[in-house]
Amino acid sequence: MCALISDRANLVDFDRTPGGAHYPLARFWLVLCFLTTCCSFRSSAQIPSGGATSSTWLSYFGDQPFTNTLALHLEGSYRATFPLDRPEQYMLRSGLTVEHGHGFSSLFAYTYLVSYPFEGGTLSPASASGKQPEHRAFEQLQFEHPLIRVGEKRLTLTHRFRAEQRFLGTAAEGLGVTKWNFAERARYRLTAKIPFKTASWWIVPNYISIFNEVYTSFGPHSGESPFNANVDYGAFGWNLKSRFALELGYQHRYAPMANGVIGQNDNELQLMLLSTAPLRRLHHRAQ
């Protein structure tokens, strides 16, 4: 299986000046500046119609191999208004990842998602109240390839294509789900991962990950506009041993409303744990 974590030796040396001097604190101040900028979005972002502008996401993303070509895919996330004032969404996902070689992989997965829209939340304006469930199946094809060789490491690009089949429930307080709607959506994500030179100080990140993802609706239930949403993401990543990583970053999500006015326009603080630990290793640790 393709590991999330690469060797730390001989990574991109962003801390060296043309004269050869090292500044090990450079990336620390870069991280601090990044986090300060993210926090400022809470007060400066454009206010959407009827909703907050910032939220916090806590997530786990894992591909746990059990053969040379197959892995159990596991995801979970918790979303709340910033910093963690009020819960808005829970998501659980499981699936099967298949490695095809030469940078290609596919994923077949099921998602259960529950949203709690409320007045003043990032999911506002809410057309319904209470627990809003969604069942989602999707098929995904991913291709990863090196772009630029830097020393003995490479900046890599990942192309991700995903088709989703969504069953969205509409609920009302005290009545439960009163209606189910079916929708189809396609997504394309382009991710760049830029490795850093290994640093001796633990707070200094090992890499930067950035991506842009476009969501489009299709099929007989797509509505008048095919554009569904656009997401931009940037994060610093820390390698934790050989099979784990931690990412701390900022994500902006924009989703227009059907009438063209500003809809969801959310600035998100993201904290994500990533893993490619094999199932047998996790099982041994549990014992």
Image: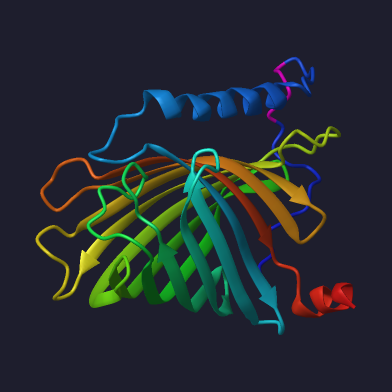
Q: Position of residue 130 (x, y in %)?
A: 35, 62
Q: Position of residue 164 (x, y in %)?
A: 34, 73
Looking at the image, which residue sits at the far right?
287
Whether residue 3 is visible here, answered yes or no, is yes
> For residue 158: magenta?
no
Viewer-side residue, 186 vs 74? 74
Q: Position of residue 118 (x, y in %)?
A: 34, 50
Q: Residue at x 48, y 68 (%)?
A: 142
Q: Quadrant location of residue 207?
A: top right
Q: Position of residue 61 (x, y in %)?
A: 61, 62
Viewer-side residue, 136 vs 211? 136
Looking at the image, is 70 positioned above or below residue 194? below
Q: Residue at x 90, y 78 (%)?
A: 287
23 left or right of 140? right
> For residue 15: magenta?
yes
Q: Residue at x 75, y 33 (%)?
A: 204
Q: Which residues are magenta?
A: 14-18
Viewer-side residue, 2 vs 219? 219
Q: Quadrant location of residue 286?
A: bottom right
